[in-house]
Each structure stands twice: as C-alpha cells, then as structure tokens.
C-alpha cells in the first residue's frame, strides 16, 4: 500500500498551482478552534494553524499560485461564518486567493461529488467526509480524466465566485 504524502510534501513538490474546492456547509465541528470560536474565545489563525500557514506561505513565496473556492449555502451556516472569520488571518495572510460562491449560483455547474485539492493540474487529493463533516480519509489519484474534471469544475466555480473581500455574509 502506497503512503499518501503529507500536505507539506504535496506543497513542497508543487511547481505551479494548488487549487482547493470546498463544497460543504460544515466541516469537523469537533475542531477545537471551531469550539473556541463558538465560545467567543479570540484566536489568531496564523498562530493556531502555524504549520499550515508556513506550508502555504513557503509555496506562495516560490511562485505557486494557491487558490481556494468555497461553494456555500446562503444564508451561511455557523461553520461557514467561522471559516469566513479566520480566512483573512490564515488563508489570505499565507498567500492564498479565496473566493466564495453561493450554492444557488452553482446549480448549472458540473461538480465532483467530493472536495479536492488539485496540484499542478495533474495530482488530485480527494477529501472524503462523513455526514457530519468529520474527515474520514483522503484519496490520491493522477488519473488524467479526474484531474481534467476537477480542473474544469474549479475554474467554472472560480469564474463565478466573489473575492473574499467582497463576499457578504447574509
């Protein structure tokens, strides 16, 4: 059985692009950071997720274009409010470009059934979650048809999506 590379390894080996499509309205509600946020405790995203911040910052500083698109129901869930609140201090600060798309605006798009990361248009890391949004496993594939589907889906969402600074939580 082949070992799945870590995010650090995937980003280290990435040369041009790393894109991430998120399609759920909630993820890992057991995450201590989400629990703390719900309780009103202040948190510094770059400090809380220092490893992630460092991985993305290193890739972006090498010239890797890191983009994240989120398809969300509007009005947004409590978890999406949390993601929105930490995006500036984590994703944007690390060098990611983030956009948001209302689920209503995605109806006519062909989308994969799972969230994914696509590295250099060829390596797909598929995220599998249970019904409550808890991470179950990841799947890595270099199947060219899957990579092509994921790239087309991401780009279609990206073209319609609103940049983070302009997206309004309603």
Image: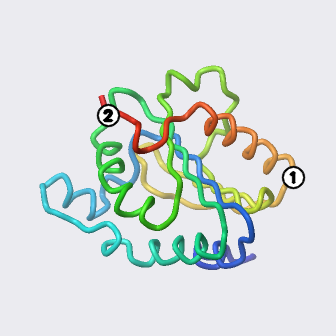
Provide residue 108's location: percent of width, then percent of height. Answer: 65, 20
User: Dot 2, how many residues are within 10 Å of its Cα: few (below 14), some (14-19), or many (20+)?
Assistant: few
User: Dot 1, how many residues are within 10 Å of its Cα: few (below 14), some (14-19), or many (20+)?
Assistant: few
Does residue 149 appear left or right of residue 107 in this picture? right
Q: Residue furthest left?
A: 40
In the displayed structure, would residue 86 be above or below residue 48? above
Q: Secondary structure at mark 1?
A: helix
Quarter of the rendering containing residue 139: bottom right
**Residue at screen point 27% across, 63% down:** 33
Q: Secondary structure at mark 2?
A: loop
Give the camera-side residue of 140 and 87.
87
Provide residue 9's location: percent of width, then percent of height. Answer: 64, 79
| Sequence order check, earlier mark of 1 and 2 | 1
Provide residue 53's location: percent of width, then percent of height. Answer: 45, 72
Point out the image quarter for the N terminus.
bottom right
In the displayed structure, would residue 10 be above or below residue 143? below
**Residue at screen point 70% across, 61% down:** 17
- Please identify, in this view, whether the residue under mark 1 or under mark 2 is nearer the observer: 2
Give the camera-side residue of 87 and 130.
87
Q: Are marks 1 and 2 in contact (CB under 8 Å)?
A: no
**Residue at screen point 40% across, 36% down:** 167
Q: Which residue is mark 1?
A: 144
Numbered label tally: 2
Does residue 100 appear left or right of residue 62 in this picture? left
Give the camera-side residue of 152 and 59.
59
Does residue 82 appear left or right of residue 87 in this picture? left
Q: Which residue is mark 2?
A: 169
In the displayed structure, would residue 98 be above or below residue 141? above
Provide residue 42's location: percent of width, then percent of height. Answer: 16, 63
Q: CA distance from mark 1 to mark 2?
A: 36 Å
**Residue at screen point 40% across, 44% down:** 165
In the displayed structure, would residue 142 be above or below residue 1? above
């Amino acid at each position: 059985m082949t070992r799945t590379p870590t995010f650090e390894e995937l980003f280290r080996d990435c040369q041009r692009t790393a894109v991430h499509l998120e399609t759920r309205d909630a993820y890992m509600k057991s995450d201590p950071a989400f629990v703390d946020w719900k309780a009103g405790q202040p948190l510094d995203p770059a400090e809380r997720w220092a490893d992630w911040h460092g991985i993305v910052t290193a890739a972006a500083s090498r010239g890797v274009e890191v983009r994240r698109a989120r398809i969300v129901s509007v009005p947004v869930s409590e978890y999406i409010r949390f993601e929105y609140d930490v995006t500036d201090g984590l994703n944007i600060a690390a060098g990611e470009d983030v956009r948001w798309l209302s689920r209503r605006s995605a109806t006519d798009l062909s989308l994969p059934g799972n969230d994914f990361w696509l590295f250099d248009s060829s390596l797909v890391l598929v995220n599998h979650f249970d019904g409550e949004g808890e991470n179950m496993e990841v799947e890595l594939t270099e199947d060219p048809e899957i990579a092509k589907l994921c790239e087309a889906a991401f780009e279609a969402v990206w073209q319609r999506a609103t940049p983070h600074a302009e997206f309004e939580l309603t």
